[in-house]
Amino acid sequence: MPTTPDEVRDAFLAETRIGILTTLDNSGWPISVPVWFEWDGSHARVFTTAQSRKIGRLQSDPRASLLVVNNVGEQEYWVAIDGEIDVIEDGAAKLAARLAGRYWDMSDEEHRKTVDMWVKDGAKLRVLEITPTNVRTYS
C-alpha cells in the first residue's frame, strides 16, 4: 500500500486512465486533447503521428501540461504534470504497442491490426516526452 505522496501519485498514474494533454497554439491559446500516457516516475510519455498538429504547436512553444483525473465514484484526486515536451523519433512504435496493451483489449482483431500497422509504420510516429518542471496533485 502506498504511503508517501510520491508513492500515491505513482500508483494512481500506473492505473489505466486517460490523460488530457494541453499545448499552446501560436497565440498562446490552450488546446487540450485526450491521450494515452505512461509515467515512469520522472517523465510522462505519449505518442502521436509525425504530422500531428501537436508537434507543430510544440515547435513554437514546448510547454505543456498533462492532467490525469480520478474516475467517477472514486475519491477526488488528480495529478497535473507541467513541463516541456521533447519530440523523440525513436521508440514511438514500441510505446504505442505498450500503451495499446494497457488501454485496449488486445484479443480484439481490429485492435491487433491497428497496433501491427503502428509498428510497421513506426517512422510515422513520435514520442512526446514531458520533463516535469512541476507535478501538482490534489486529494
Image: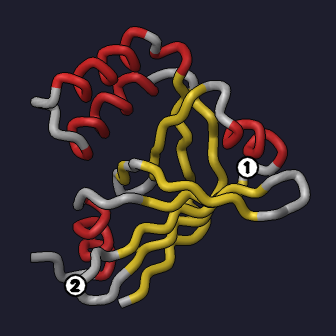
Q: Residue at x 27, y 18 (%)?
A: 113
Mark 1 vs mark 2: which is more N-terminal? Answer: 1
Q: Residues within 10 Å of mark 2 (few under 14, many from 20)?
A: few
Q: Residue furthest right?
A: 27
Quadrant for residue 64, please give it: bottom right
Q: Is residue 7 above or below residue 40?
A: below
Q: Is residue 123 above or below residue 130?
A: above
Quadrant for residue 70, please give it: bottom left
Q: Residue at x 26, y 46 (%)?
A: 103
Q: Which corner quadrant holds the N terminus?
A: bottom left
Residue 73 numbered mark, or none: 2
Identify the residue position indicated by label 1 in the image.
Answer: 62
| Residue 56 % position (x, y) | 76, 37
The reply, left or right, for residue 72 in relation to residue 131 is left
Residue 112 numbered mark, or none: none
Mark 2 residue element: loop
Q: Residue at x 22, y 83 (%)?
A: 74
For marks 1 and 2, give the one nearer the viewer.
Answer: 2
